[in-house]
Image: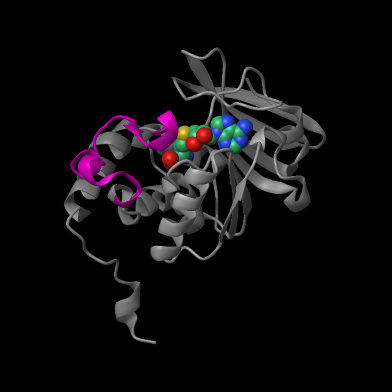
Amino acid sequence: MSSINTVPALDDFANERKHMVESQLRSRGIHDERVLNAMLQVPRHEFVSEELRTKAYADHPIPIAEDQTISQPFIIALSLQALALTGSESVLEVGTGSGYQTALLAVLARAVFSIERYATLARGAEAILAKLGYGNVRVFVGDGSHGLREFAPFDAIVVSAAAPTIPKSLVGQLAEKGRMVIPVGPPHAQQLQLVRNADGTVAIETLEGCRFVPLVGAEGY
Ligand code: SAH
C-alpha cells in the first residue's frame, strides 16, 4: 500500500486544529501525545451544524441538537488523557451526543461502544462516524447509566453527562485495572472524577471542576 495513506488529509480547518492543540491543550498540561495527535486529526467541525463550523475549534462547549452540547476541547482532552489508552482497549462511552469524542476514542482504542438516550443524536453520530471511516465503533440507543452489560467488561469508560453519584452498574462493568472518567455532582457544577478499579478496590481521584448536561436515567438524574 502506498505511504500516502498515512498522511492526514488536509482540510480547511487543519490550522485551527493545530492552534487548538497548542493554545488550549498542550499549554494547559495535556501531554499524552496520542491524545494530542488524535485531536489534531479528528475534524471537530464535521460534528457541529453548518452555521457553527467556524466556531468549532473555539475554547468552549458547542450546542448540538436536543439541547445538548459537545464539551470544550480541553475537558475532552483531560478525560481522554486520564483514561491512558494505548490502542488495545475496549471502551464504553455514555452519551454519544455529536459523536466527536466517539471519533477520538475510535482513534485511541481498539473497540468503542457508545450509548446515547436520544435516537436522533445516535443516528446522526453513526452517520457521520461512518462517513469519516471510523469502523471500530458501535452506537446504541438507550439509558447508558446502566452501562452496556452484554459487552462488559470495559478497559475504560467515559461518561459525557453529569451523574448525582457514580453509577454502581458502571463500576461493575470496569475490567480489572479499568478506568472511568465521569463528572459527578449537582446540575450546575460538578467534579470530573477518575475511578480506578484495581485488586478489588476502587480508587477515586478528582481531576477538575466542570459543567456537563445531566445524565438522565435510572442511575442518573
Ligand atoms: N461526548 C459528546 C457529548 C454529548 S453531551 C460529544 O462529543 O458530543 C452528553 C450526551 O449524553 C447528550 O447527548 C445526552 O443526550 C446524553 N445522555 C444523557 N443521559 C444519558 C443516558 N442515561 N444514557 C445515554 N446518553 C445520555
Q: Nearer the viewer, residue 217 or 149?
A: 217
Q: Position of residue 69 (x, y in %)?
A: 40, 32
Side of 26 where 209 appears, left or right:
right
Q: How was this image coloured? A: one colour
Task: Identify which residue is drawn at 65% across, 30% down.
Answer: 195
Note whether 124 is above or below 173 in the view shown: below
| The furthest residue to the right | 200
Note whether 164 is above or below 69 in the view shown: above
Q: Position of residue 199 (x, y in %)?
A: 80, 37
Task: Identify which residue is drawn at 49% across, 45% down.
Answer: 120
Residue 130: image quadrant is: bottom left
User: Is residue 63 at least partly visible in the picture?
Assistant: yes
Q: Position of residue 23 (x, y in %)?
A: 23, 37
Q: Position of residue 31 (x, y in %)?
A: 39, 42
Side of 198 where 118 appears, left or right:
left
Query: Could you tell me which quadrant the C terminus lies in?
Result: top right
Q: Which residues are magenta?
A: 46-70
Task: Identify which residue is drawn at 39% across, 87% down.
Answer: 1
Side of 78 where 214 appears, left or right:
right
Q: Is residue 151 magenta?
A: no
Q: Is residue 69 magenta?
A: yes
Residue 216: image quadrant is: top right
